[in-house]
Image (cartoon, rainbow, N blue to C red):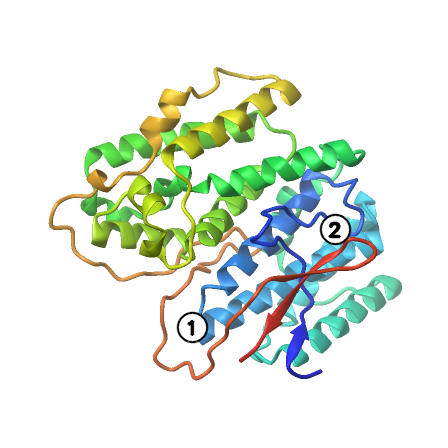
Amino acid sequence: MSGTNIYYLSGLPKQDQSIWLGNDPYTSSAGKLTILSSIDVLLAELKVTKDKKRLVQIYNQLDRFSILLYGYENIAKGDKELFIKVAKQVAFMSTEKCFLSENLNLDFRKSNLEQLKKLLYNRLKTGYTGNRFNHKLYSWIDKEIISYMNTARISGEVDWKRKNQIIRDTKKSAHLYLYRFIRPNERKHYKEVAFKKRNGQNRIFNWVVDNNDYFTNTTHNNLVRSGIIEESNMTPEQLLRYMRVNRVGFDEMAKDKRRVGIGWIMTVVGVISVVSGLISIYQQLFGTKRDAPSDAEIKQSLPTGSDVLIGSKNSTNKNGTIPNGNNTNTGVTQKSNNSKQAFITKNIPLFTSAGILFFLIKKT
């Protein structure tokens, strides 16, 4: 292949903000959505990352989650006991450095992923047991995916569309949770009101998780992070820094989209409306375990330019965290002096007869 490469990934297109639910979109567990949302957030970061080292990390993490998705859908086909075997093989493969390629050539990576799929299949067939096992990775898969394999399954087109709406609206209103990404060493740059708002954001976030059988805490966090990136063309850490340095808030950026390039920021009124709508859907579907956040609480929790201390200085943008099997720092570095490769990634949807959505990634 040359020119435009059909990459091996599936994900969620920016233009319609819905998530790809796999080869069988009408039946999807909360566990499967953990895999898909992990792919989604990595794809979002891929589009705003230029640092070569970070690109390698993202591609390798995508390989791992792509193999988990392949094992879930094509081998286990939703069978929990069989997927446990898949997860164990992935843990063996991880210790054997199967997901540590430094090659950024997309033709190579596509071919390499096919080899990894064959390796997984053959090892399952022969009952392979290696000498080293990534217990930390397996524990994460067990907790975040296996434990939720038989929960909140979608059945039928109506429920599938409803879940897509929830995911789409969660991502569109993700800026509501921005202060959850403030690091401890950044606290000095904000007034106390910012942390009162963060407490409010945490309450709303936790209410959604506690009253939502569709997806887990990890999936919700992934959707929030990828939603912020897709709406603003910045990671949460980069956006916080931008707001702090330029002393602009949520509504100011919504009114002046040029502030964040081609990104689009929803207005305060829009966020309140969308989040209130989501809360109503959760109440209708799952009931409530405790009092739902009010419109006033949502409004009071939104970031504003006045939350930043006067005279706040620029700060170095360090790595953030994406939930992944190794729980490692996997954030975005804004620029790299040693990177000679510039990547422009475009998420062009390709619809097949089965309705499967792939990303075309163009290397320039």
Secondary element under disc 2, as helix, strand or loop, is: loop
Task: Name which residue type carries label 2.
Answer: Gly
User: Cα distance, mark 1 to mark 2?
Assistant: 30 Å
Secondary element under disc 1, as helix, strand or loop, is: loop
Image position of 182 with respect to 118: above or below: above
Side (left or right) of 333 relative to 195: right
Q: In the rendered structure, which disc, 1 or 2, sits on the residue that comes first in sequence?
A: 2
**Residue plotted at (74% across, 61% down):** 89
**Residue plotted at (55% across, 43% down):** 218
Q: Which residue is mark 1?
A: 51
Q: Which residue is at the front of the view, 167 or 287?
A: 167
Q: Position of residue 197 (x, y in %)?
A: 31, 32
**Residue plotted at (50% across, 16% down):** 290
Q: Which residue is at the front of the view, 330 or 95?
A: 330
Q: Are marks 1 and 2 in contact (CB under 8 Å)?
A: no
Q: Which residue is mark 2?
A: 22
Q: Is residue 133 visible?
A: no
Which residue is farthest right?
125
Rendered image quadrant of residue 107: bottom right
Q: Quadrant of the N terminus?
A: bottom right
Q: Position of residue 361 (x, y in %)?
A: 61, 70
Side (left or right) of 288 relative to 255: right
Residue 193's disc number: none
The total number of labels drawn is: 2
Q: Position of residue 166 (x, y in %)?
A: 60, 35
Side (left or right) of 219 relative to 330: right
Rendered image quadrant of residue 262: bottom left
Task: Name which residue type carries label 1.
Answer: Asp
